[in-house]
Image (cartoon, coloured by chain):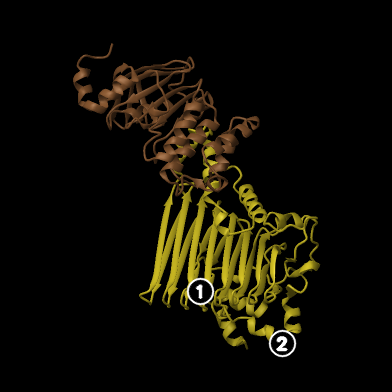
């Protein structure tokens, strides 16, 4: 589904990704861990094609197509969806209007309504301007609703569990565990709360701009929780195989 | 009010405080000869929100040049709404005269003076006490003859406890490539009345516009004053001024502006809060393209306790040759008054564009969504169907964006 080869990415003149390799197969869910500023969000921005993230070396291959130079909306139309960590407010554009616009087809509208219902997005929220005055939980629920409404094949979730209370986490977790079935996904999580609901098959650790280890999500996460990323630093000396 | 003709003649030489100064001799007071009005005038009305079609079950006033072409109060609202020409009003009601030139001085500048001396047409609209009219009352002023000064005076009285929506469209027919529209409007919102007054203006690059508006808001009365200006205008200058004289009176002005071409617009707004608990809000959202120039002035003066005033100006620049200035002014004469302002001018946010593109929307579509969103009509407090139609007019005007 997604294959990233030796990806080097610059923002301004700062090299943020220094040779990332990552492969996510069809129907696979992967987790990505890493300390703050290790490059996780930069990787997300590079995959989706943010214009400020300039690929200086390497390739992004999505569904067998080299999308490294493709504009964002084309990647998205090919079946890529990103749930952002801090999406912007857009005054004057109503959430409902956007969801209607991006839902793949009219036939899916019923399904999208069900999705909105499950995510507890009522008509009042749909009438509001995107992310304007939304609570933390509302932002996440609406991000997830938008992305799932597009019915993508690969979903990237950048910290879907940050800034979310227990009730919202449960709602989001349950929805994702259902909706991601059969899809490929990459989940970035700091606290791992979302892993109570989603069971990734593989995990990666990012450190200083590259992925330094892959392995069993539970083993890696438990180790990070007990020893912190200092452990990774020592471990990284051993290099990734 | 007795007008002093000598003073008026002197005032004819007085430029307005703001905006481009016009030479009135470049325009004509009369159309010159008989005007054959073409059938497509109704279509011009639709472009500014005035619908003469079969759905039209509304109270309507339609003036072309100096001639009141059509005036009708829908039967179900007879007894709730009185809609007269100025001459009819003065003839019918002894007291009507008191409502002329009370909220606006005829000596203010050359435009008010010209109106006082040579004004032609306009309407006298009264929503009778306690009557609630939720079907919009529509009025339309169309200039048809070239070089003409359309020079109208309107009086609106929302009597105590009444409620109404007024939508008024002003436009120039394509025949009138050059012209001047002067509109003096005096709006009285009496005790506990609620009035929503929406103006939609669409002119042309050779057209000049000088509205002169005075507003009086009494106790617990509310006026939502919406102004929508679309496209190009030669020059425009207006500074509607509201006095809140009754406790708890509310004035809320919303300007939605899309300017292009070489338009020169000086759009202001003033509120004088003279009574306790008064509220005033002056909001402008403007998209400025081409070589257009916009000056947005806002002024709130608070002279009573427990009052609140807010000025907001947001400008979206679509061109490096355009210019936007925001000039807010707050004056407080009471400790217990809370006055605030905010202004932001910039281009379309790349972050917002990227976000919409990450939802599979192309750059062009995303730009269009943001521009349309910027000209948000939801603050106009219109009933759904009216908001939809205003939104449609705005969308049409910014087509290509």
Label 1, residues with CA under 10 Å away: few <14, some 14-19, many ≥20: many
Query: Residue B248's mark?
Result: 1
Q: Earlier in the sequence, mark 1 or mark 2?
A: 2
Nearer the observer, B348 or B14: B348
Which residue shows up at 67% across the image and 72% down it?
B152
Q: Quadrant of residue B328?
A: bottom left
Where residue B307 appears, as percent x and y from the top left, is: 44, 72
Query: Which quadrant of the structure image shows residue B32?
Result: bottom right
Residue at x-position 35% and y-position 24%: A32
Q: Which mark is residue B94?
A: 2
**Does residue B233 appear anywhere in the picture?**
no
Q: Residues within 10 Å of mark 2 (few under 14, many from 20)?
A: few
In front of the other: label 1 or label 2? Answer: 1
Q: x and y percent of residue A181 in the render? A: 50, 22
Q: Colour of chain B?
A: yellow
Pick the residue in front: B34 or B293. Answer: B293
């Amino acid at each position: 589904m997604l294959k990233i080869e030796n990806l080097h990415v610059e923002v301004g003149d700062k090299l943020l990704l220094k040779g990332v390799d990552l492969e996510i197969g069809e129907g696979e869910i992967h987790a990505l861990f890493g300390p703050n500023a290790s490059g996780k969000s930069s990787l997300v921005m590079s995959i989706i094609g943010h214009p400020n993230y300039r690929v200086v070396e390497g390739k992004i291959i999505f569904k067998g197509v080299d999308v490294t130079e493709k504009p964002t909306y084309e990647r998205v139309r090919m079946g890529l969806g990103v749930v952002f960590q801090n999406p912007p407010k857009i005054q004057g554009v109503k959430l409902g209007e956007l969801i209607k616009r991006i839902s793949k087809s009219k036939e899916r509208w019923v399904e999208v309504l069900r999705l909105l219902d499950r995510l507890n997005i009522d008509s009042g929220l749909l009438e509001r301007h995107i992310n304007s005055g939304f609570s933390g939980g509302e932002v996440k629920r609406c991000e997830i609703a938008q992305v799932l409404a597009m019915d993508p094949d690969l979903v990237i979730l950048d910290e879907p569990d940050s800034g979310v209370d227990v009730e919202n986490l449960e709602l989001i977790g349950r929805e994702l565990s259902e909706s991601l079935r059969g899809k490929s996904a990459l989940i970035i999580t700091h606290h791992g709360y979302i892993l109570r609901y989603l069971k990734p098959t593989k995990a990666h650790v990012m450190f200083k701009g590259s992925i330094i280890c892959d392995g069993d999500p539970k083993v890696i996460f438990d180790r990070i929780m007990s020893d912190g990323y200092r452990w990774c630093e020592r471990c990284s000396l051993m290099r990734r195989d | 009010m007795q007008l002093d003709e000598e003073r008026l003649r002197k005032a004819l030489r007085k430029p307005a405080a703001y905006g481009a100064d016009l030479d009135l001799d470049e325009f004509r007071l009369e159309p010159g000869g008989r005007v054959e009005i073409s059938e497509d005038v109704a279509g011009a009305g639709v472009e500014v929100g005035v619908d003469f079609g079969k759905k039209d079950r509304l109270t309507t006033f339609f003036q072309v040049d100096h001639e009141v072409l059509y005036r009708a109060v829908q039967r179900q609202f007879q007894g709730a709404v009185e809609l007269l020409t100025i001459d009819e009003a003065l003839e019918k009601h002894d007291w009507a005269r008191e409502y002329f030139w009370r909220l606006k001085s005829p000596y203010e500048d050359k435009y008010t003076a010209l109106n006082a001396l040579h004004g032609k047409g306009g309407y006298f609209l009264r929503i009778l006490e306690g009557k609630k009219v939720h079907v919009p009352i529509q009025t339309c002023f169309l200039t048809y003859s070239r070089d003409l000064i359309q020079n109208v005076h309107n009086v609106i009285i929302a009597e105590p406890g009444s409620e109404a929506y007024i939508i008024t469209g002003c436009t120039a027919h394509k025949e009138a490539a050059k012209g001047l529209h002067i509109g003096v409007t005096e709006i009285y919102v009496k005790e506990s009345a609620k009035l929503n007054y929406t103006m939609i203006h669409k002119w042309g690059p050779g057209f000049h516009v000088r509205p002169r508006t005075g507003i009086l808001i009494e106790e617990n009365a509310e006026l939502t004053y919406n102004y929508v200006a679309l496209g190009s205008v030669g020059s425009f200058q207006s500074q509607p001024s509201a006095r809140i004289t009754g406790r708890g009176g509310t004035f809320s002005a919303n300007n939605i502006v899309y300017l292009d071409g070489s338009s020169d617009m000086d759009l202001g707004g003033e509120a004088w809060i003279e009574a306790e608990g008064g509220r005033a809000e002056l909001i402008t959202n403007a998209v400025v393209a081409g070589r257009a120039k916009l000056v947005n002035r806002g002024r709130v003066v608070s002279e009573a306790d427990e009052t609140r005033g807010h000025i907001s100006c947001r400008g979206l620049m679509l061109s490096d040759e355009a210019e936007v200035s925001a000039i807010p002014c707050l004056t407080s004469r009471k400790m217990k008054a809370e006055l605030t302002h905010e202004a932001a001018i910039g281009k379309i946010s790349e972050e917002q564009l990227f976000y919409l593109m990450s939802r599979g929307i192309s750059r062009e579509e995303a730009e269009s969504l943001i521009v349309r969103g910027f000209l948000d009509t939801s603050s106009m407090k219109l009933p759904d169907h009216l908001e939809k139609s205003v939104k449609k007019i705005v969308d049409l005007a910014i087509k290509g964006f």
